[in-house]
Image (spheres, rainbow, N blue to C red):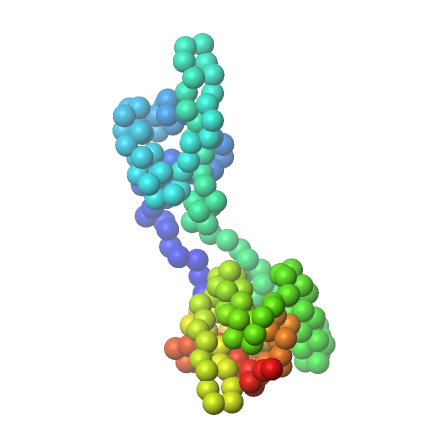
Amino acid sequence: MQQQPDDTPFFTSTRGKLVRLLRRSSHTVEELAEQLGLTDNAIRAQLMVLERDGLVQQQGQRRSRSKPATLYALTSVAEERFPKAYGLVLHQLLETLTDQLTTEEIDRLMRTTGRRLAGLWPSSQGDPVHRLEQALALLDALGGLAELEQGENTYTIRGYRCPLAAAVPGHPEVCRLLGTLLSEVIGASVQEQCDERRPAPCCFIIHKME
């Protein structure tokens, strides 16, 4: 099962400590300097780098008895640096389902989930190639990386990064969830031929569409 990237060195650095403080609440330069035992100028230099990297942003001002002070807060990009339990929880959930449900029941559950997930996005419109491109964009939005290959009678969506990679090992039924999702978005039957041993593990075949 894939793990979150190890950001331990970052979080033990001064910038990492600033990010942790700002995750709790927005702060001024003076407040951050006091908590970390650094000068205001040292904090400003670190904040400048964090702003450049898109991890910190200015968020209004806090008025005091002297002059207003700029507040700094984390961006959504910074929040992604913190470990997430989604993959671990999903994997354990699938383990539990496998213990309690039959293969047919799990298959139905995966396909139903794929259809429900597809319903969160607008229906694809346009010619077949445009609908396939919309499906690739959806996989990208979910955290995957896929390309479209066109054959004589088929299209192939070949994925180099699976958006559900943390759950796939030991649970190939997850591929049926993605296959159903793609089928709903594209408006055509999708055949799953995924193999996690290949460099591009995700593979979905679509016969030529009208």
As drawn, the residue found furthest toward the bottom would be 152
Decide which of 84, 207 is in the foreground and name it.
207
Q: Is residue 58 left or right of residue 101?
A: left
- In this rendering, the answer to whether 61 lies above or below 93 is above
Name the residue at 44% across, 73% down: 147
Residue 28 lies in what quarter of the image?
top left
Name the residue at 37% across, 25% down: 29
Expressed as whole percent of the image width and height from the top left, the position of residue 170 reads 54, 75
Name the residue at 58% across, 63% down: 90
Expressed as whole percent of the image width and height from the top left, the position of residue 129 reads 52, 75
Residue 181 lies in what quarter of the image?
bottom right
- In this rendering, the answer to whether 63 lies above or below 45 is above
Whether residue 96 is visible to the viewer of this picture, yes or no, is no
- State how many labels appear: 0
Expressed as whole percent of the image width and height from the top left, the position of residue 96 reads 65, 68
Q: Quadrant of the C terminus?
A: bottom right
- In this rendering, the answer to whether 39 lies above or below 149 is above
Q: Is residue 15 left or right of residue 120?
A: left
Decide which of 83, 110 is in the foreground and name it.
110
As drawn, the residue found furthest toward the top would be 65
Name the residue at 31% across, 24% down: 40
Expressed as whole percent of the image width and height from the top left, the position of residue 20 reads 43, 38
Whether residue 144 is visible to the viewer of this picture, yes or no, is yes
Q: Is residue 185 left or right of residue 25?
A: right
Residue 67 lies in what quarter of the image?
top left
